[in-house]
Amino acid sequence: MIMFVDVAFPISSYKVFTYKVSPALAEKATVGVRVNAPFGRRNVKGIVIAVYKTNPFKGKLREIKSYVDDEPILDKPLWKLIVWMSDYYLTPIGQVAKTVLPSKLSTRYNPSVLWMVRILSKGDNANLDNLGKNAPTQAKVLAQLKTYEDVIQVSELRSLARNPLGVCQRLEEKGLVKLLKETRTPNVTGFTFDPISKQIYFTKQQREVLHKLSSMLNPKKFSSHLLHGVTGSGKTEVYIEICRKVLAYNRTVIILLPEILITPQIAGRFKSVFGDAVALWHSKLTQAVRAWTWKRICLGDFKVIIGARSAVFAPVKNLGLIVVDEEQESSYKQESPAPKYHTREVALMRGKLHKAMVVMASATPSLESYYNQIKGKFTYLQLSHRYGGAKYPQVFVVDMKKEQDEAGKIGQIFSGLLLDKIENRLNKSEQIILLQNRRGYAPIFRCNNCGEVEMCPSCNVTMTYHKVGHSLQCHFCGLKKKAIELQCKNCSGHNMGLLGIGTQKVEDILIESFPGARIARLDLDTAQSIVSTTKLLKKFSSGKLDILLGTQMIAKGLDFENTTLVGIINADTGLYLPDFRAGERVFQLIYQASGRSGRHKKPGEVVIQTYDAGNAVIKHAAKLDLKKYYNMALSERRELNYPPFSWMSNLVFSGKKKTTVLDRADKVRTGLSGKYKGLDIIGPAPCYRERLRGRHRIQIVFKSAKAQDPNGLKLHHFLQQNFGPEINQQTHSGVITSLDINPVSIQ
Ligand code: ADP
Ligand code: ZN
């Protein structure tokens, strides 16, 4: 019987296309299956989103060519997840489908095969002249093989024959050689630490947490939890144990980690317990490993998937548990391309659809999750002590302004205290982690005498210095001020400076100051290949390096026994980004980084260098006083109606010509006022990154108070009605409009 299907393609449009399915293919025509279909002049991969028995479309139809996969990849919940994401993030379903099922991946992948050949004794004794009369190439190849004792790769004979395999096959027919086929299974060992076995005796607190979680493990029910455990409290051991229980129910597990760099160590720990049932999944695997792993996930070979953001879509069947480790991390947000999803949101929805358990875990939860826990949306589980009596490190705050006055040197990178402590650790053969989180784009204009950075009074974000026009601007509400010529408005000093020290510079100074030390740097520039970074981390772990220097990527998740000093070179980096979450991020980063120190028997120390020692964020972070800081931050958010007290979305307009972008933003803005009570529309104002890749960027921010819009539905409908179809399309004189639902940064 002929069938008809609607197919969505990964294009930026909501349009779907109807196709005919021939009787031969009709049997497999189901919703969620991937097809190759003619589209324009090419064949394109698409996904079936509806199936009909009669033709729903009057025009002439083209025909589906073939299926992409042999097995249906999507189970119902995963398909529903795609549909939900398309609606929630206002993104065409074809584009969501491509995110969930990357088009390069297919269950038809087969690892490459390597042909080997070995000469047999009959071949060794064969008369080459006779053979050469009829088959000169075969004789040449055989002569060559006589010189080898062992098997060799057939491809090594390429200089003698254009098709060496064919020649060897002829020789094999004559009984002169033996061909052997070796499947080259992609090698995954470079991506994980070696498994180590360890005796685990759970503490009372750990047992309590495990007991609560186990009691909620129910194959028919969704549940969500916030596991708030200080760094080194054994959260990972808890995941492993609960994972064991979930597997016993014959269900599968996804463990999400915020940073690819820490996947090898954690995967090693899981492998020591679950062996080959564990698979690693992230974007830095090689093509072959990715393709191979994905196929085997589809076939059900793996029960535990450990990975970064995209692992939330791992097509495991019978999912029972998702853990989102360090759930506050902004790397969980996909910024581009659309859908701009947040892994936390997707994990919760996937958990609901699979009736699975979802555990948000962190030493420093996001304010959102912290608030959700207060509101009772998550059960709250706590691990408040480090395992094995390991003490929390002692923290020293160095006021770099004072340091500067005393040393008489400006722009110093290392304080005397930090230098002393590094020296001391080097002498004791203990290890050091140094954090220099150079992020942000435009430099910040700051007074080197008093540390003053100008803030916008109504948005509580930094004013950004603009060279052109010599002005300070709030990139949130658009407020603009003339910068006082090279003078601090707080102390009237004339020592204004641009901030900016990168890891590279720090490394140079380290090498100069400690010529004998073995130093490694890890940041986006050096972390190009995961295999080489894993090597580097293994090296540090086994004591072959003294100092590990890096950006925020080294601040979390790593567990090194001999690290007893963490230095935060400039704790203020990121503090002055024009984003209402800036403070929260800096707090979490300092707290996390501190957590790398003294995790085991040896006590640890942390040195925090700051130009703003009086800053509330730095002060609370230095005391590692999370509760106090969170309560303060929550009351600030409440006052300004920021998330978690409101729903937020932002709309970014970008284009080559500034005036066209502005015009477009103004026009859109004009039509939007007064739609419902509790909706707050801010802007248009320039984005913090005002020009990005040659495009001017202007944004409008929407806030919808939870008091009036408890589930965010009002804002959702408002956005859907006003913007749905035009998002991400090159419309209106080259101005692209892109919508971000629940953005993690307003930049
Ligand atoms: P977190 O994930 O909370 O930072 P980890 O799970 O990495 O903490 O635990 C810190 C260290 O303590 C790890 O080396 C871990 O193996 C060890 N550990 C934690 N709990 C136990 C336990 N119950 N028995 C033995 N070792 C433990
Ligand atoms: Zn000043």
Image: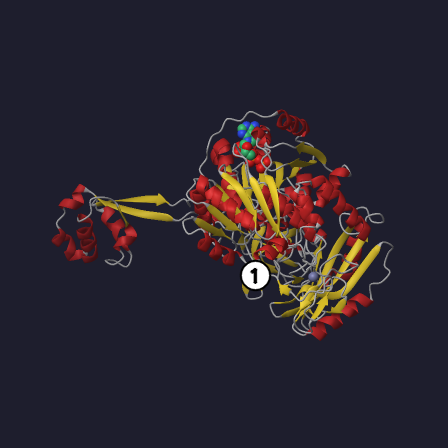
Crowd band around label 1 with a 10 angstrom C-alpha radius: few (<14), some (14–19), many (20+): some
Decide which of 714, 494 is in the foreground and name it: 494
Considering the numbered disc 1 on the image, is that residue within a helix, a strand or a loop? strand
> Residue at position x 44%, y 47% from top?
536
The picture quadrant where one finds residue 340 is bottom right
* Residue 411 rendering spot, x and y as whole percentages: 57, 60
Decide which of 424, 41 is in the foreground and name it: 424
Please name the amino acid that badge 1 sits on. Pro
Decide which of 12, 89 is in the foreground and name it: 89
Query: Looking at the figure, which quarter contains the C terminus?
Result: bottom right
The picture quadrant where one finds residue 240 is top right
Tell which quarter ligand 1 is in: top right
The picture quadrant where one finds residue 59 is bottom right
Q: Is residue 684 left or right of residue 123?
A: right
Decide which of 700, 456 is in the foreground and name it: 456
* Residue 422 rendering spot, x and y as whole percentages: 50, 46
> Residue at position x 42%, y 52% from top?
515
Q: Is residue 540 left or right of residue 376?
A: left
Residue that numbered label 1 is attached to: 38
